Image (cartoon, rainbow, N blue to C red):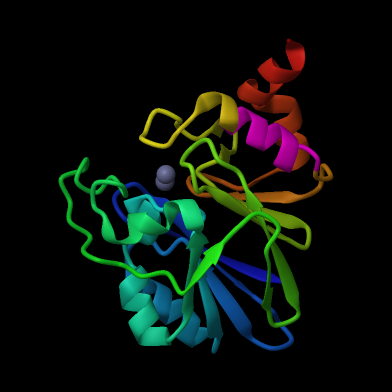
């Protein structure tokens, strides 16, 4: 599996393209903005995009979904609880930022915990990790996990937006992510990559949980 990272939009959200080197089949995770930049990476690597995968429905992760879907003919997948964010500027928080990202919907596939998706030879598993939003998910790949706004390098996502819940967020991280091996790479929704082992030891939110 290869991963391309791009920082897009005003909140510098990480958009990832993960692809199978054998088949050149690929998925885009969280195309929040700058659709043309994302397309240029797809074309220069000669990738065939199968899915547009969304870790959750906030505007900074979904703003280029419609553009890319129309250009690439890929299927849009989001957890059932955040699917309504695709065409609701209140729920996706773009109104809160005084932006209008337009209608990005509908989803082609609604996700639930435990679903498996195949991108070429790569198997991805959907982990429902509510807390930042009700429909937040992480995508578990071989040796890596794409955590959206659930877990960052040294921090965790906000839980004060509608649908957020602080206790749920920490429970999701402990029960769904901290059970992974130390060497799993974390690709978060904002900021630099990390590993499960590093966050287990140095992330203050996780350290606090284990210290109680
Ligand atoms: Zn978010
Ligand atoms: Zn975000």
Identify the residue shown where x is 37% and y is 50%: 58
Q: Residue furthest top?
A: 212
Q: Residue furthest right?
A: 181
Left or right of 77, for residue 67: left
Relative to 149, is 110 above or below?
below
**Percent position (x, y) of residue 86?**
34, 61
Relative to 161, is 90 above or below?
below
- Quarter of the image for residue 34 reads bottom left
**Percent position (x, y) of residue 57?**
40, 53
Figure quarter occupied by ligand 1:
top left
Classified by dominant secondary structure, the portion drawn in magenta counts as helix
* Frontmost residue, 56 versus 20: 56
* Frontmost residue, 24 versus 74: 74
Relative to 45, is 65 above or below?
above
Asked whether the viewer can see residue 36, the reply is no
Give yes or no for residue 171 being in the magenta stretch.
yes
**Percent position (x, y) of residue 37?**
37, 73
Which range of residues does the magenta coloring cover?
Answer: 169-179
Identify the residue shown where x is 48% and y is 78%: 75
Left or right of 14, for residue 126: right
Identify the residue shown where x is 72% and y is 56%: 144
Which quadrant is the C terminus positioned in? top right
């Amino acid at each position: 599996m290869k991963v391309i990272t791009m920082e897009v939009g005003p909140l510098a959200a990480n958009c990832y393209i993960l692809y199978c080197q054998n088949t050149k089949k690929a998925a885009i995770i969280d195309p929040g903005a700058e659709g043309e930049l994302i397309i240029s990476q797809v074309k220069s690597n000669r990738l065939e995009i199968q899915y547009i995968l969304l870790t959750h429905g906030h505007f900074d992760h979904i703003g280029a979904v419609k553009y890319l879907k129309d250009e690439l003919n890929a299927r849009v997948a989001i957890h059932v609880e955040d699917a309504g964010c695709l065409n609701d500027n209140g729920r996706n928080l773009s109104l809160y930022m005084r932006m209008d990202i337009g209608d990005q919907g509908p989803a082609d596939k609604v996700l639930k915990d435990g679903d498996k998706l195949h991108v070429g030879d790569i198997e991805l598993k959907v982990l429902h990790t509510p807390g930042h939003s009700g429909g937040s998910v992480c995508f578990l790949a071989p040796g890596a996990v794409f955590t959206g706004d659930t877990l960052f390098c040294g921090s965790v996502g906000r839980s004060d937006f509608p649908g957020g819940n602080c206790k749920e967020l920490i429970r999701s991280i402990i029960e769904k992510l901290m059970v992974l091996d130390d060497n799993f790479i974390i690709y978060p929704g904002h900021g630099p990559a990390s590993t499960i082992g590093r966050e287990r030891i140095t992330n203050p939110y996780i350290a606090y949980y284990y210290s109680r």
